[in-house]
Amino acid sequence: MATSRVEEDLRIPIRDGVHLGADLYLPDGPGPHPVLIQRTPYERTSVQPPGRPVDGAALVRAGYAVLVTSCRGRYASEGTFRPFVDEGADGVDTIEWTTRQPWSSGKVGMLGGSYSGVTQWLAAVEAPPSLGAIAPLFTPAEYLDGWTYRGGACELGFLWYWVLVHLALPERLRRPGDETDLPTVDRLVSAIDGLEDLYAAGPSDRTDLLERLAPYYRRWLERPDDDAEWQSIAPAERFGRVTAPSLNIAGWFDIFLGGSLACYRGVRDRASGDGRNARLIIGPWSHGTVGGHLAGRFFGHRSSSDGADMTAEYRRRFDHWLLGVDNGIDREPPVRYFVMGPNEWRDALDWPPPDTIAVRLVLHSDGRAVGTEFGGALSRTGPLDELPDELVYDPLRPVPTRGGATLLNGSDVGDRCGPVDMSDLLGRPDVASYGSAPLAAPVEVIGPLSAEISLSSSASDTDLVGAVVDIDPPGRAVLVSDGILRLRYRSSRSHPEPLRPGVVETVTLDLGATAWVFEPGHRIGLILTSSNFPRFDPNGTTWPSGSGSAGTVTARTAIHHARIPRPRSSCPSTVAAPELRAPPSSAGSDIRWMTPLAKAPGIALS
């Protein structure tokens, strides 16, 4: 960078005697300068934050010093890397050390994405007095349900990819002072090269390698329930302590979308002082893909981080929060989001937008939704007295992942996530599909989506997976948003409870959030399954008597569509007289979303 200078391999002392490695990027000029800190477990190769929605070099040219530090136990930093555990204290010590340096003006902010967003929130909830602002990108509000698990199911594909590709291999190859263990490196490379085969085959012999190089991985698998240890490192448990304003950046198809929205909502509701001054920007992006292209679909130049000029967005907020520049930020709506379809940016006074209302579509099928292409229906009326649909799920033959908010291995990470066509999955015995009639007018879905599903199962545990899809006239079923619920956690994330075979219960399935417009002639669809692999680990269905990983016990799960479900003689999953655990008035199944209030009366099915 012609307009800056670099000081490499600084040593930052931490309270327990550990020293962290850092590189400093300084603007031209005498200083002192306001400082932006990025703390990362990845290699310090440049001033550029990972994910690249912001040009770090441009911030340096604008007069900010940028300090890029390695997390404890990573690369040249001393100590042992324990994901999430040490980032709060280490972050506070780094911030306070920064304020004492001659090149620092004492005005300090933080930036970066993914794990660098983790390091920001875990520092912010400690409320260090010198932290003036944060700008977390693509990062969750907790690290059990939101990073390691979702809805109680393990984010297996992401964890394999993250730990092997981004943590274990780079560290093994590049950490100074270590002798290179060539046999281990060879095994690592072979494991990474074989991830696609592993994704296809299911969990196998990679666990021992992960445990040896990343012992925290086994610890995560052993603790699927929410407990005091998980809660102690969850920012969501301590949002009330946050005092620094925040710029939260999210993506509609980012793996951490739900967490980013929860971070914004949590500090708006619970933080004190300037901590309530949260801002939210949501683009049509996935994790690390911010160019406006996803799954072969282009949302227009303005959808990219460059087209939206995200660097200017960062700079305006840091200028205001750290330097006191009156540039109108405090008078602007706090939320900006991109609507897919018309491909336009909109502003809102909050998230979800306050001028939206809930809309409900009821599931119907009379037993015809499984094994057909949208043999079930979605309508504004019901529920009726209809036969259930039965999902026959074999844990050894899970439904393959198709798009969504994924982060999986491969050179086409951005192409395998997002609005992918799911129609090739229809016809399986473990896939049920429901579609509305063709739309007579555009329908906007703006905000969170959920489904209330009445079900019974032959198993003590199984998963409920759902995807909202846009069915176009040629018959493609493009994924809009999705979710999963491991049914042992249907009532509590802390206290799992087995299913009672044949008992009908109504459960809530979180389907994420979106801003999507269904065009006239298209149909709104819902796909229900019991698995989504390799994104999530297949449920073995025998819990608590057996393992929660893949097993061999087939689960037969009935989806009910009547106020008082009645058995189907050919449906082995329902007993002769099923017991209704949920109130009869809520025993039907439906999907719900938010739509702009002004457009709600116009929702019509042809």
Image: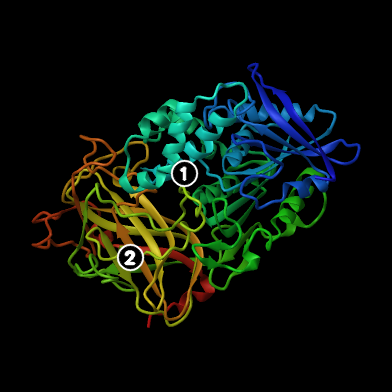
Say which label, 2 or 1, has the lower sequence index: 1
Q: Kindly indicate the quadrant of the structure image that contains residue 105.
A: top right
Q: Decide: few, some or many residues near mark 2? Use Cα within 10 Å; few <14, some 14-19, many ≥20.
A: few
SS for tag 1? loop
Residue denoted by label 2: 424
Numbered circle sitting on residue 146: 1
Q: Residue flagged by tag 1: what amino acid is it?
A: Gly
Left or right: where 225 falls relative to 146: left
Q: Residue flagged by tag 2: what amino acid is it?
A: Asp
SS for tag 2? helix
Q: CA distance from mark 2 to mark 1?
A: 28 Å
User: So how many labels did they put on this image?
Assistant: 2
Residue 307: x and y in percent read 68, 63
In this view of the protein, which residue sits in the foreground, 117 or 47?
A: 47
Do the numbered discs 2 and 1 sit on residues whose CB atoms are within 8 Å?
Answer: no
- Quarter of the figure with the C terminus: bottom left
Residue 144 visible to an observer of this rendering: no
Residue 160: x and y in percent read 43, 40
- Quarter of the figure with the N terminus: top right
Residue 188 visible to an observer of this rendering: yes
In this view of the protein, which residue sits in the foreground, 483 or 330?
A: 483
Left or right: where 7 falls relative to 342: right
Q: Kindly indicate the quadrant of the structure image that contains residue 573.
A: bottom left
Residue 317: x and y in percent read 74, 50
Residue 12, placed above or below residue 591: above
Which residue is found at the position 42% from the left and 81% from the top? 521
Residue 507: x and y in percent read 31, 53
